[in-house]
Image (cartoon, rainbow, N blue to C red):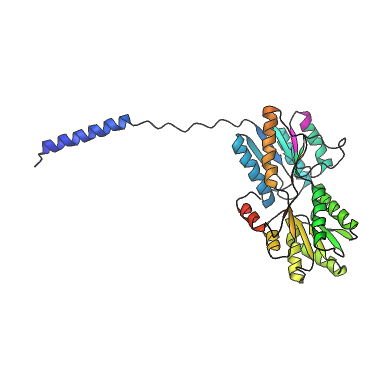
Amino acid sequence: MFSRKTAFAALSLLIMAATVLAACAPIPTPAPTPPPPEFTFYVVSHGGPADPFWGVVMKGMEDAAAALNVKATYSGPEKFSIEELVNLLNSAIAAKPDGLAVTITDPKALDEPLRRAIDQGIPVIAINVADPRPEGERIPYMFYIGMDEYLGGKQAAKRMLSVRTPKRAICAIHEVGHVGLEARCKGFAEVMSEAGVPVEKLDIGTDPTAAVEVIKSYFAKNPDTDAIQTLGPLGAIPAIQFLKESGLAGKVLHGSFDIDEVTLGGIKDGITLFSIDQQQYLQGYMAVVWLYLYNKYLLRPANDVLTGPGFVDSSNVARVEELIKAGYR
């Protein structure tokens, strides 16, 4: 039987042993402080950050910034406004960044501020929308990253014609004057016209409810219309709603640009033949990568970097849906 004295001695030995072990244990080192960003870039666009399309561009920008240890900031008006776009661009220029990636949505409005930025030595890349003017007139940015909008329109018409030749078609434009959307319409109309199909550009606006009424009114006046080409979700959503409500789903050919849940649903339901995807994740990602490479090593591509057109249709819509959930499409 242990005495109190023996028990106390044993306890003292245990405490001493624990103390020695603690003293021998390695001292945890604090996590290293991350180095400051090497460069600062701005992506200035006509699309608001709440728009799902531009959310994917932002993810690409943020992923590249994290991989390269640079700071990248996205700026875009909440609602489509060239005036606000110019204001945001001027604010970005005033911050004296190491590079700018800008959508050339209105070349005339953006001409002066972007030339001023270039004169200040700020590298400028165009993304998503290029300056369509001749080389001698266009803004002298380094190069363009995005889809060839005119080619996309032509490919849309060819895909539609491969199914059947419509009697009459409309190109439903939701932002009249947007050079990228206008180029899509132009390419679509040219190929259709060559095939003998009359095409009318229909201004549907950005309000989906009002757009349904505009399309409905057009069809009432032109009942032989059997093809609709929309230029993005703001056109596809009301067009699909109209086709469902009017009983014309599957009877009127419908193609679109860009992807969202409604457009993908239209493809799965057989209402929409296809949507042309410009892989906008690459537009955000590659803009940061190329601005980094240019600042670091004076490297740049010899030509524009095309991210589209590519088709989403019934053959690949399931896989694309998975990539949308992951934020890459």
Q: Residue furthest bottom?
A: 247
> x%, y% of residue 320?
65, 54
> x%, y% of residue 148?
79, 46
Q: Residue at x 11, y 36 (%)?
A: 5
- Quadrant of res 58: top right
Q: Is residue 216 above or below residue 275?
A: below
Question: Is residue 27 at least partly visible in the picture?
Answer: yes
Front one among 152 and 212 = 152
Question: Is residue 207 at least partly visible in the picture?
Answer: no
Instruction: Tell whether 1 sits left or right of 326.
Output: left
- Quadrant of res 296: top right
Q: Which residues are magenta?
A: 117-125
Q: Give the total number of marks visible in the rendering.
A: 0
> x%, y% of residue 191?
87, 55
Q: Is residue 21 magenta?
A: no
Instruction: Tell whether 43 sits left or right of 229.
Output: left
Front one among 199 and 18 = 199
Q: Residue at x 80, y 53 (%)?
A: 155
Q: Residue at x 72, y 38 (%)?
A: 101
Position of the N terminus by quadrant: top left
Q: Is residue 223 above or below residue 5?
A: below
Q: Is residue 318 above or below residue 145?
A: below
Q: Is residue 121 magenta?
A: yes
> x%, y% of residue 248?
77, 70
